[in-house]
Image (cartoon, rainbow, N blue to C red):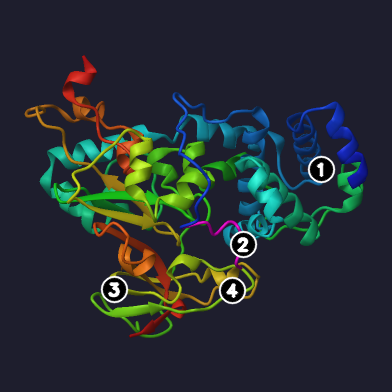
Amino acid sequence: MSEHDHHHHDHDHSELSETELRVRALESILTEKGYVEAAALDAIVQAYETKIGPHNGARVVAKAWTDPAFKQALLEDASKAVGTLGHVSRVGDHLVAIENTPGRHNMVVCTLCSCYPWEMLGLPPVWYKASPYRSRAVKDPRGVLADFGVSLPKETEIRVWDSTAETRFLVLPMRPAGTEGWSEDQLAELVTRDSMIGTGFPKTPGALS
Amino acid sequence: MNGVHDMGGMDGFGKVEPEPNEPMFHEEWESRVLAMVRAMGAAGAFNIDASRFYRETLPPQVYLSSSYYKKWFLGLEALLLDKGFISKDDVAAGHAVAPAKSLKHGKFSIPDVERIMVRGKFGRTAPGLAKFKAGDRVRAKNIHPATHTRLPRYVRGHVGVVERDHGCHVFPDTVANDAGEHPQWLYTVVFDGRELWGPDSDPTIKVSIDAFEPYLEAV
């Protein structure tokens, strides 16, 4: 199809349907050439839909909140520490956990594309990959946090981690007050995806009931 | 390259708009694009930095007006055409009409799926001693490579402090162009907000990047 035809086509169909046709055509080409098995593509999608997600990161955070030795190991070498937990997805090398404290709040971005700890948090949300977040997070993090309805004391240091290499960052948020004696399972319920990116806080105990 | 993808510090893109209960994919084709990129990469058609570079080289107006997975699709198609895995005739026909090219790791099949759900390893044996250590003051070089680089523009020429040493990693600037892995020391370098954005910047902001040693010079 020529470039002219593409343009002509756009008048009759949405960009989406044209994209859909092109994607299907590429998949046909790749399978017919014997590069990929169509069923293997299905299996990849299924694996992303079922095996990864913020529940993995939440387990790690809840464990760190209840087990000081694990927390220390996590902050020293997150890939290694997470690897000792059998029940979360297998994490690759180069995971770095960064701890929020009363004096310092951490926030993660990838200004160049979309680098994100997939194994811990799943695939990134659209906003994480979109221009407003990528452009502003490093220059105006407080303004970005305000877009999420989050505000921090004006003296709190905000540390923004731009994921420019293959290192991946997981924010370890502060444990919410009023959760003394809670089990790991209960605590994991409080851990939100955004609290592990640094654009939100964990839920409060009251928010669960 | 100084492309529109390098958007740290740009103004005018508006507010961040989180979508409540966002689905993993908004359209089915997005999941197929993700799967094709992962499968063809794992089969050895390209490495992750090459796939990034092909998205970065999309025309700026296309980059800015395309959805995330549309960019992935356009980058994938361009890359596969360039490397000879597909031809223009294939694309025009919507089917394989030209002969296949052999893949480094062979056909991607179901048993390969588990392997790609774990991230690849980018750490490599150090070819020499690290030039910097935690606490060193360093300047991000004022360099403007025309090809793939992971040194964002907003830090170039600015002074920061080395905070962590991550060991030696594959160097994106060369591996993206099939010019070899050339492992380099990788450091987390922290910059003060005022150093990057001037005296009016919020004084409580610190920004770090992970910088490969060739991006840095001693101060």
Chain letter belonging to callout 2: B
Q: Along the polypeptide, which appears first: circle 3 or circle 4?
A: 3
Name the amino acid, label 1.
Ile
From the viewer's side, name the closer residue of B7 and B132.
Answer: B7
Helix, strand or loop at label 3? It is strand
Instruction: Select label 3 or label 4 by which is in front.
Output: 3
Give the structural element (helix, strand or loop) at label 1: helix
Mark 1–mark 3 distance (CA, rounded to whole Å): 49 Å
Residue B20's spot in the image, x, y percent?
44, 25
Q: What's the distance in space between the residues labelled 2 and 3, CA to CA?
A: 26 Å
Q: Does label 4 lie on the same chain as label 3?
A: yes
- The reply, left or right, for residue A137 in relation to residue B12 is left
Q: CA distance from mark 3 to mark 4?
A: 25 Å
Mark 1 in CB contact with mark 2 (< 8 angstroms): no
The tag on residue B174 is 4
**Which SS type dominates the magenta stretch?**
loop
Up-down relation of residue A184 to residue B185 (above or below): above
Residue flagged by tag 3: what amino acid is it? Answer: Val
Please give the name of the residue rendered at 67% of the width and 44% of the height, measured from the top-left corner: B65
- Magenta residues, start to end: B1-8
